[in-house]
Image (tube, rainbow, N blue to C red):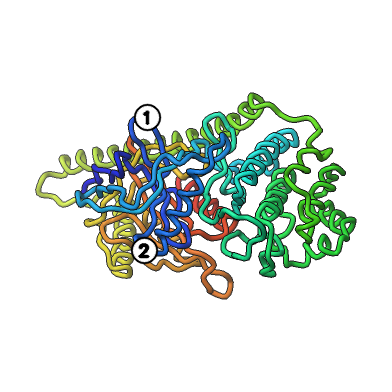
């Protein structure tokens, strides 16, 4: 069937792609209105979700800061026109879009940030958290995936779904992501909201400086050394793992940010006075140069890969045309009444592909003739997969990749889209992903891969493996 020619529209924003699906089913979509891009956070139409919507909207309306993502609009009934025509209404937020991605993407490519850059962003986050504290608001889910970058590479703290307004100690234990969660959250003790954010910020600073987590959970044995104030042993083990020395003032600051007793834990205001922040700091121009160099390298590698793919496809087409011309000439020489078999290799490849298609269609109860390729727009995100392969062969390849070790739970009707359970060694479900092919024009396909709110590290390993295998197929 032909490609989809329409896009869904929400309050005048043309939907380009889905950016994320959260564990509670909330979807974050990228929308465009004229030259403006926005993130549309759309909730399920449920009473409980309405509470989340109103809570997050209240927090964001109260917070006005250059390093906090801006709320453009929110409504319990955003008009949503689906691509095939029907109109529905969705609860949601329309938010400023972090056009340069999140910190996780850049940390993945840098491994660790330059110390001067880490200091710059740490300073921005501290000032933002102090502002929030003065508004009696804590975030409660700070992590590098929620640190976005605007067009100038200033950071923007995002996702205030677990944020709360507070006076005094809090005894509500919702929210948080395991490696960033303070021990009082695990132990369900009353806590100071600002100190929970300090603990999470300590993990973010540690990642920026080292490229890894200090520990996976604050109730794991690795954190026990800090809890027992055995800092020397903790840092010895960490430096053995990293195979390098770390600045003493950085280690001292981390010790204080990871303090077990939140009453003794350093505050954001005290962090600003710490010797670590008195060291050299990058300026925004230097950061822009480094980050754009990474983007340029990634885009250049992608362009080279696409060029090679195009050349290979061109070569294959020319070879097919050459063989067909030879066959026509031989048929003419042998006479019109004579039968002539085309190239055995061509027939063999076509038969092989046909058998693969039929086998998969029978197994997953779909038909390639009914599948519609989603129409989208180029987004140039640094972590996306772009290729110019033929749609059916690419879809078959993706199915076969995940059939090896994981479990395909659904191939969507009339779409080049599938749901996958990623399994561990015991065949238990580790997390779920969704994959869809999109036509972005100029004979290019984008492979959209969505993480259903699970561990981003494991997810990105899966994403890298998929990218590698798709590239190998075209090599």
List x then y, in percent, for residue 94.
40, 43
Circles 1, 2 touching at the beta carbon (< 8 Å): no
Q: Which residue appears at 54% of the width and 45% of the height?
A: 158
Q: Which residue appears at 82% of the width and 52% of the height?
A: 255
**In the visual, does 248 lie left or right of 7?**
right
For the residues labelled 1 and 2, the Cα–Cα distance comes to 33 Å
Image height of 431 relative to 466, above or below: below
Residue pointed to by mark 2: 46
Q: Which residue appears at 16% of the width and 52% of the height?
A: 339
**In the visual, does 97 lie left or right of 284?**
left
Image height of 26 relative to 187, above or below: above
Please name whichever residue, 95 or 417, is drawn nearer the observer in this view of the structure. 95
Q: Quadrant of residue 424?
A: bottom right
List x then y, in percent, for residue 248.
87, 44
Image height of 401 relative to 342, above or below: below
List x then y, in percent, for residue 316.
36, 41
Residue pointed to by mark 1: 35
């Amino acid at each position: 069937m032909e490609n989809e020619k329409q896009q869904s529209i929400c309050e005048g924003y043309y939907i380009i792609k889905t950016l994320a699906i959260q564990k509670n089913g909330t979807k974050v979509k990228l929308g465009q209105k004229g030259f403006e891009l926005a993130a549309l956070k759309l909730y399920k139409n449920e009473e409980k979700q309405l509470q989340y919507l109103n809570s997050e909207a209240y927090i964001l309306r109260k917070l006005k800061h250059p390093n906090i993502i801006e709320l453009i609009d929110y409504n319990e009934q955003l008009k949503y026109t689906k691509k095939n025509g029907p109109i529905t209404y969705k609860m949601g937020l329309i938010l400023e879009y972090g056009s340069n991605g999140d910190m996780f993407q850049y940390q993945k490519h840098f491994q660790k940030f330059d110390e001067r850059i880490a200091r710059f962003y740490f300073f921005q986050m501290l000032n933002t958290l102090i502002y929030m504290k003065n508004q009696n608001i804590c975030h409660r889910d700070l992590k590098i995936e929620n640190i976005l970058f605007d067009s100038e590479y200033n950071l923007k703290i995002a996702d205030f779904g677990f944020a709360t307004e507070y006076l005094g100690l809090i005894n509500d234990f919702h929210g948080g992501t395991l490696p960033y969660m303070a021990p009082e959250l695990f132990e369900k003790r009353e806590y100071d909201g600002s100190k929970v954010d300090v603990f999470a910020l300590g993990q973010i600073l540690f990642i920026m400086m080292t490229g890894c987590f200090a520990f996976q959970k604050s109730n794991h044995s690795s954190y026990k050394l800090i809890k027992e104030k055995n800092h020397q042993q903790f840092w010895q083990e960490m430096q053995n793992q990293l195979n390098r020395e770390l600045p003493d003032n950085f280690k001292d600051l981390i010790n204080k940010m990871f303090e077990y007793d939140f009453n003794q834990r350093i505050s954001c205001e005290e962090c600003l006075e710490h010797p670590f922040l008195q060291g050299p700091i990058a300026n925004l121009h230097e950061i822009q140069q480094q980050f754009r160099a990474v983007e340029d390298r990634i885009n250049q590698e992608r362009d080279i890969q696409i060029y090679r793919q195009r050349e290979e496809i061109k070569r294959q087409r020319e070879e097919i045309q050459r063989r067909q011309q030879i066959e026509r000439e031989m048929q003419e020489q042998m006479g019109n009444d004579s039968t002539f078999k085309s190239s055995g290799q061509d027939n063999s490849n076509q038969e092989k592909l046909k058998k693969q298609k039929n086998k998969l269609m029978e197994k997953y109860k779909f038909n390639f003739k009914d599948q519609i390729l989603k129409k989208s727009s180029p987004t140039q995100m640094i972590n996306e997969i772009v290729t110019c392969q033929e749609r059916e062969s690419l879809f078959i390849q993706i199915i076969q990749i995940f059939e090896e070790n994981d479990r395909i739970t659904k191939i969507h009707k009339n779409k080049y889209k599938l749901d996958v359970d990623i399994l561990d060694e015991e065949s238990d479900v580790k997390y779920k992903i969704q994959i869809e092919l999109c036509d972005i024009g100029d004979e290019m396909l984008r492979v959209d891969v969505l993480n259903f709110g699970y561990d981003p590290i494991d997810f990105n390993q899966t994403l890298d493996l998929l990218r590698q295998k798709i590239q190998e197929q075209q090599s």
